[in-house]
Image (cartoon, rainbow, N blue to C red):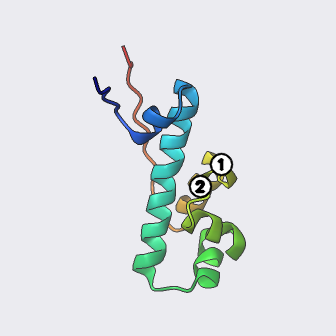
Amino acid sequence: MSQEYKSVWDAIEDDKVNAANLKLRSELMMKISEYVEQSGLTQSQAAKYLGTTQPRLNDVLKGKIEKCTVDRLVNMLTAVGYKINLRISNAA
């Protein structure tokens, strides 16, 4: 019998709190990757606009989620004009 999950993070992370955090970080990281790709900028140039360093941006682009915090990712997106909206709902 197979089990259904709402996200890959729910499938690989037993702790619901950690799964929610990983899901949020991955969504922010994907948006940053999309920004860099669409901008046509080099990593160094994009890092300056995002208010970070090239090595830190590279961590994001390589999917190194363990090196990325929610606040850092939000700051990066906000620096280039993104508006972050948060939707919270009762899981029950």
Q: Is residue 78 left or right of residue 57?
A: left
Q: Taking 15 as reference, is 28 above or below it?
A: below
Vertical placement of 17 versus 72: above or below? above
Residues under numbered marks 1 and 2 in contact, where contact means CB atoms less than 8 Å apart? yes
Real-space Cα separation, disc 1 to disc 2, in angstroms:
6 Å
Viewer-proximal residue among 32 and 18 = 18
Residue 38: where, in percent of width, then height?
40, 78
Most extreme residue toward the left is 1
At a point 63% along the width and 75% down the height, the residue shown is: 47
x and y percent of residue 68 in the render?
A: 65, 53
Q: Residue at x 64, y 83 (%)?
A: 44
Residue 20 seen in this snapshot: yes
Residue wearing tag 1: 69
Q: Judge the density around disc 2: few (<14), some (14-19), many (≥20) Cα neighbours within 10 Å.
A: many
> Left of 76 or right of it: where is 84?
left
Figure quadrant of residue 67? bottom right
Mark 2, residue position: 73
